[in-house]
Image (cartoon, rainbow, N blue to C red):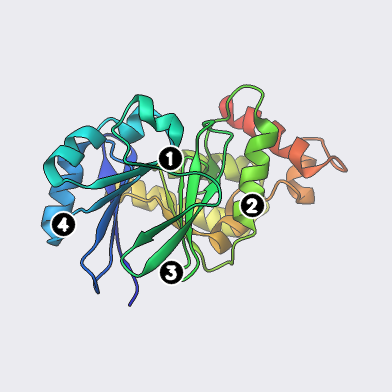
Amino acid sequence: MPLDIHVFRTLSDNAGALLHDPASGACAAIDVPNAGEVLAAAGAKGWAISQILVTHEHADHIQGIAALKQATGARVYAPAAARGGAPVDVVIGEGDHVALGGDDFEVWATPGHAEGHVSLISRASALALVGDVVFVMGCGRVMPGRMEAMWTSLSRLMALPDATRLITGHDYTLSNARFAAAMDPGNPAVAARLAEAEAAKAAGRFWALTTIAEEKATNPFFRAGETALAATLGLVGKPAGEIFAALREAKNKF
């Protein structure tokens, strides 16, 4: 039986996310920007949170964990770097596995945005919890000196099957879509997604769920090896990792 997924806005643009296994009743919160908002979302669904899965150590992803754990007794699975800001029951890292009901999540180290960043991958559910490594049509800011690490992390995620759904950490979709259109102006898929992002913003719709296929078609950071992107930056013939770094610097100034 597939996992139920609920993604919602918390704080101003963070993604709150809940995964629920209908067979066992197990429910996991993915990061906790705000405990009250996560509890309210779970209550509205009638789900009892039993686990907290953490992607990385930044405060806006872990600041609500202590309160949520106190309210629910949930077991916290997090990278070691999160221990300074949250009560962690089980430290997770590359090669570990976390069970949610009958589902199994592989833990991948995906540094670049944060040194302790991990992504959790369920092959059975075709689902990846990618935190701030990937956003809809974008990627997270990169730590100084860690462009190569971020490109490696992105490349690894890009190799997942096209149908894999990605739960991302923020909704920066409209800004990302505008940047993608500037970098890849001849791409009709980007133009269509920009129009969708503008409509979503106007309607107040939160957008932090995407797929590998959609990102391959429209995310400039996924398309760093494409000639069109290289031409925009004057880097035709350069390695994809170098083009990615130039794109990320351009986005920082966009």
Q: Where is residue 148? Give x, y as percent.
A: 70, 35
Residue 158 numbered tag? none
- Residue contact at pointers 2 and 1, CB within 8 angstroms: no
How busy is the neighbourhood of tag 2: few (under 14 within 10 Å), some, or many (20 plus)?
A: few
Q: Which residue is mark 4?
A: 48
Mark 3: which amino acid?
Answer: Ser
Q: Secondary structure at mark 4?
A: loop
**Residue located at (23% from left, 70% from top):** 24
Q: Residue furthest right?
A: 237
Q: Earlier in the sequence, mark 2 or mark 3?
A: 3
Q: Residue furthest front?
A: 90
How busy is the neighbourhood of tag 3: few (under 14 within 10 Å), some, or many (20 plus)?
A: some
Q: CA distance from mark 2 to mark 3?
A: 18 Å
Q: Which residue is mark 2?
A: 156
**Would residue 130 appear left or right of 154 to someone viewing this image?**
left
Q: Is residue 226 above or below residue 246?
A: below
Mark 4: which amino acid?
Answer: Ala
Q: Which residue is mark 1?
A: 172
**Residue located at (37% from left, 60% from top):** 99
Residue 125 numbered tag? 3
Q: Residue 66 is drawn in which quadrant?
A: top left
Q: CA distance from mark 1 to mark 3?
A: 25 Å
Q: Secondary structure at mark 3?
A: loop
